[in-house]
Image (cartoon, helix red, strand yellow):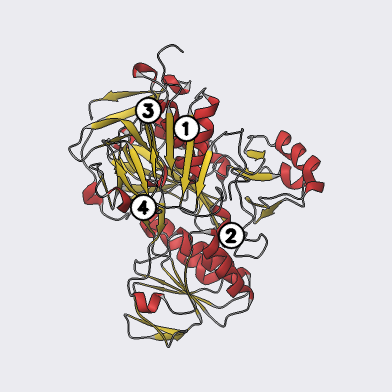
Amino acid sequence: MHIVVDLNRCQGYAQCAFLAPGVFTMHGEESLLYTPVAPEDQRARVRRAVAACPVQAILVGEEAGAGAR
Amino acid sequence: MLGEPRDGRIVVVGASLAGLRAAETLRAEGFTGSLTLIGEETHPPYDRPPLSKQVLLGKVPADRTGLPQRRRLDADWKLGVRAGGLDPVGKRVLLDDGADVPFDRLLIATGTRARPWPHPDEAAMDGVFTLRTSGDAAALAARLAAGPRRVLVVGAGFTGSEIASACRERGLDVTVAERGPAPLVGALGGTLGELAAKLQRAHGVDLRCGVTVTALEGDGRLTGAQFSDGTRIDADIAVIALGAVRNTEWLAESGLAAGPRGVTCDAGCRAFDMYGIVTDDIFAAGDVARFPHPLFEYQLLSLEHWGNAVAQAEVAAHNMISTGPRRRPHLTVPAFWSSQFGLNIKSVGVPTFSDQVVIAQGSLKDARLVAVYGYRGRVTAAVSVNQARSLEYYRHLIETAAPFPPAPGAADQRESPVPVPSDVPDPKLLSHGPTVALTGHLPDRRLTVVQPAR
């Protein structure tokens, strides 16, 4: 499960960091750091974080171009 | 829709963020023809912003920043092969491996590369790095993890400053050499540059401004550097962060308006040829594109911004499969972010398009503020430091060409209500022009209103 966050849109509400702390963490007061490739066991938590983001800044999906290597 | 060019062959040169988002948009809007993506790197599209942050901090491996795709692309990926030329008459992309790829419509999204250190012998030494690709980030992160004695960062723009921040967070000694008077001054001007300088020093960076690096020393392996003020330091790693070079060389013989400043295109992302005539079938998007923006007096802008790559790619893709009045302009307000030294810096508009700046909310002392930039009496940009939620309001002021300085809001007391010169580089490039407001709500109704200058 690959993740990208539109950090122009992100406003540091930190809902994702509460719901999936293994993937999203706050760095300083309002900067978000995240793991772009989430472990499989985090899938359900990441889905909840995506849904809860007040500004809908998180995009998840399969890896782009997978199999193109 | 009848008559819309929804089939045929579309080739996208550049398989990074802009190329990927364009490909997704093409499919999302009903393109059913053949789609080919050509990428010089062997990796599928990956996200670059984490490379100078999570990756250098050792939290994420460099080869694990692959971008998610929003939909199945049904595309032919040609990765690890460089486009070496373009035949606009025969409508073929010429690949370095000798093959050529015919197209009906082409998107140029070749982006930029790191500007190398100008002395090739010094640049080739062990310990000298640039940071642009995931391979660069992997190599640098490994060396930072090994605990160098001192890291030299050459250039204190956003990338250089983020590298320095990551080094300090890892407890590494770091020297930053910046030719200008302060870090970030080229992008944000003097007021926030001073704040950045204070922050870097407060975090233990050996920051040297107003100096250049005159030599990288070493015998095959970096040992130190000399500065233009006559001083020198020992360092076993140097990261060259002197900005980016646009990847346009492959277009030299193409007849397009392509050069060191990018590929010039119209507001609908259609590339110009060298006579200034717009092409019908060649488009450009992302860092490599250079386009006019009415909010900034139709100056040709090239933006090395993540958000611009996404927005411009979507417009380019839409226009590649739309005709006449259904085509859209690329009119989004530029925006970017940076995370460094514990601060979240976000920008909307074009701060360098300014003559004055005012701290509209918060204060420099608390390093929590919104700086608003104006040009000839209207708001053209705003930059927040740890105050991101205020920025949307200022984006609206920029879009509507609101008067500068902005009226005091209900939010915080201003530190200094008096605008001061913004001290951005090259003010002589600014020109007199009309006042422009973006209007409309749906993307295809996003229009401009141009009024004569006051």
Image location of residue B344, percent across then percent down: 56, 53
Image location of residue B436, percent across then percent down: 31, 29
Task: Name the residue that disc number 4 marks.
Answer: B247
Q: Are marks 4 and 2 on the same chain?
A: yes
Q: Are marks 3 and 2 on the same chain?
A: yes
Q: What kind of element bears circle 1? A: helix
Please tell me how many numbered marks the rendered image carries: 4
Residue B7 picture quarter? top left
Q: Residue at x 35, y 74 (%)?
A: B120
- Disc marking residue B329: 3
Taking the view exactly as shown, the residue that stands out farthest to the bottom is B219
**C-beta proximity under 8 Å, tags 1 and 4:** no
- The disc, 4 or 2, on the residue closer to the chain's N-terminal end is 2
Amino acid type of the residue tagged 2 in the rendering: Lys
Amino acid type of the residue tagged 1 in the rendering: Glu
- State which quarter of the image contains the C terminus of chain B: top left
* Front-most of residues B79 and B158: B79
The residue mark sitting in front, 4 or 3, is 4
- Disc marking residue B439: none
Chain for disc number 3 = B
Q: Residues within 10 Å of mark 1 (few under 14, many from 20)?
A: many
- Cα distance between the residues tagged 4 and 3: 24 Å
